[in-house]
Image (tube, rainbow, N blue to C red):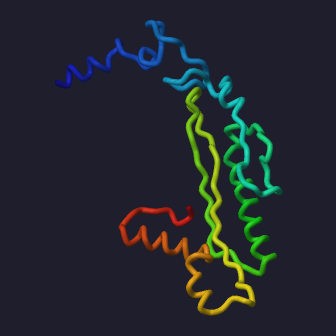
């Protein structure tokens, strides 16, 4: 048995035979990963990938489509999502409310052409509480608490998931 194993790893087998050596397989370019069409530096998909914000906030980046390299995409998306967090705190302070919960999720993907891992986008979720108006009656406030308070809706959905035993991400 040991003889068969050593024979399989003998001089007739090399890494270049698997990844292309002239046996009808294409040679890999420098930096190219096996199974992908191009190397990251030659990838048209990565060169033409554009990021754009989908929110209604005016003072955040990427309101117009813009290119970001895969290497810089993580920092750019995290900075963009931080702008949304900052806006939530500013809006809450202006209205006399407060931010109860804030979560940011950053999504990564793999380029289908070159295999580079890049940050594909992000999502910021905030829950704020604003003060009630002076004209509200106590009975109305109690009856409408779950309908008008986003924190109550959030808490109810989390409790529902926990009671059912589902996994969940508290930031989303």
Residue extending furthest toward the left:
1
- The correct choice, above or below, for 6 with respect to 76 in the image is above
Lateral position of residue 150 relative to residue 93, left or right: left
The residue drawn where x is 75% and y is 74% is 92
The residue drawn where x is 63% and y is 55% is 123
The residue drawn where x is 73% and y is 48% is 53
Residue extending furthest toward the bottom:
138
Lateral position of residue 161 relative to residue 26, left or right: left
Q: Position of residue 153 (x, y in %)?
A: 55, 73
Q: Nearer the viewer, residue 133 or 12?
A: 133
Based on the displayed image, in which of its 4 quarters is residue 90 positioned? bottom right
Task: Give the quarter of the figure containing the N terminus.
Answer: top left
Q: Nearer the viewer, residue 104 or 75?
A: 104
Task: Give the quarter of the figure containing the C terminus.
Answer: bottom right
- The correct choice, above or below, for 142 with respect to 162 in the image is below
- The correct choice, above or below, for 86 with respect to 35 in the image is below
Q: Position of residue 115 (x, y in %)?
A: 56, 31
Q: Position of residue 152 (x, y in %)?
A: 56, 77
Q: Position of residue 148 (x, y in %)?
A: 62, 76
Q: Nearer the viewer, residue 70 or 105?
A: 105
Q: Nearer the viewer, residue 56 or 32?
A: 56
Based on the displayed image, in which of its 4 quarters is residue 78 positioned? bottom right
Lateral position of residue 54 relative to residue 63, left or right: left
Based on the displayed image, in which of its 4 quarters is residue 102 positioned? bottom right
The residue drawn where x is 83% and y is 57% is 59
């Amino acid at each position: 048995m040991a003889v068969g194993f050593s024979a399989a790893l003998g001089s007739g087998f090399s890494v270049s035979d698997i990844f292309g050596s002239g046996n009808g397989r294409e040679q890999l370019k420098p930096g190219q990963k096996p199974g992908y069409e191009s190397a990251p530096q030659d990838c048209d998909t990565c060169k033409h990938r554009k990021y754009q914000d989908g929110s209604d906030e005016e003072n955040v980046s990427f309101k117009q489509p813009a290119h970001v390299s895969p290497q810089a995409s993580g920092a750019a998306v995290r900075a963009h999502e931080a702008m949304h967090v900052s806006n939530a705190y500013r809006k809450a302070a202006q209205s006399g409310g407060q931010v109860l919960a804030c979560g940011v999720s950053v999504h990564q993907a793999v380029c289908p052409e070159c295999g580079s891992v890049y940050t594909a986008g992000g999502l910021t979720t905030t829950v704020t509480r604003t003060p009630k108006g002076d004209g509200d009656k106590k009975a109305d406030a109690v009856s409408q608490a779950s309908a008008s308070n986003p924190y109550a809706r959030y808490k109810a959905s989390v409790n529902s998931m926990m009671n059912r035993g589902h996994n969940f991400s508290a930031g989303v």
